[in-house]
Image (cartoon, rainbow, N blue to C red):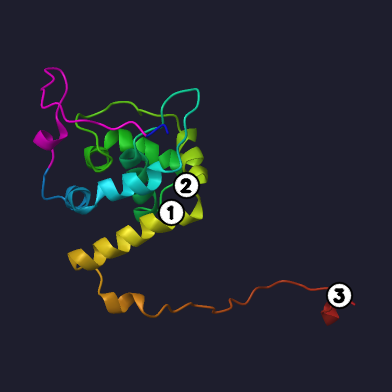
Amino acid sequence: MSRPREKRETGEQDLFRSRLDQIINMKHELVRLAQAIDWPVLEERFGAVYSDGPGMPPLPTRLMAGLAILKHTFNLSDEVLCERWVENPYFQYLTGETFFCHTLPFDLSSMTRWRSRMGEERIMVLLQESLSLAVKTGAMKPADTRQVIVDTTVQPKNVMFPTDAKLI
């Protein structure tokens, strides 16, 4: 089974590139989120969908899952997310980058293919991980998940229907 590429810490410095952990505030909320997420659990669950085949190896699970988290946290389109990822070191740190990147390490269509490959079941795992993390960090209470309130308020519209008296 072909597993996603994993980034391994070599401990080596790169003279011409900036390490993210040396230029960002390590107390920033996205840094704390990156440190709190159980990435090995997500890699184990999401890695099961990959199989051997020709072509490039899959992108790292942390990169793709991190992008999904950022996309839904900030309500961004894929295009805007990728633009912000290139310019935001905190986005890059959350997705597992060690050094600041000036270009995307993937094609924009990779995000769509990853979401379709994961399916609803595995995306629910990502949702469960984020909810358990919110409870663990105190951002949400367990009682907040017991009841869901759905707003079904109907907004009046100025729409003419064929059964209206004016149209007959």
Mark 1 = which residue? 123
Q: Position of residue 44 (x, y in %)?
A: 33, 46
- Give the structural element (helix, strand or loop) at label 3: helix
- Range of magenta residues: 4-24
- Give the structural element (helix, strand or loop) at label 1: helix
Which of the labelled discs sits on residue 165, or is there none? Answer: none
Q: Closer to the camera, 25 or 47?
A: 47
Q: Are marks 1 and 2 in contact (CB under 8 Å)?
A: yes
Indicate whether residue 11 is drawn in magenta: yes
Q: Amino acid at mark 2?
A: Met
Q: Residue at x 24, y 51 (%)?
A: 38
Badge 2 or badge 3: first in the primary sequence: 2
Which of the labelled discs sits on residue 167, or is there none? Answer: 3
Indicate whether residue 6 is drawn in magenta: yes
CA separation in Å, label 3 and label 1: 48 Å
In this image, 79 relative to 19: left or right? right
Q: How many marks?
A: 3
CA separation in Å, label 2 and label 3: 50 Å
Please, is residue 10 above or below residue 38 in the view?
A: above
Q: Position of residue 81 (x, y in %)?
A: 38, 42
Q: Amino acid at mark 1?
A: Ile
Q: Residue at x 54, y 78 (%)?
A: 152
Which of the labelled discs sits on residue 118, or is there none? Answer: 2
Badge 1 or badge 2: first in the primary sequence: 2
Q: Residue at x 31, y 59 (%)?
A: 130
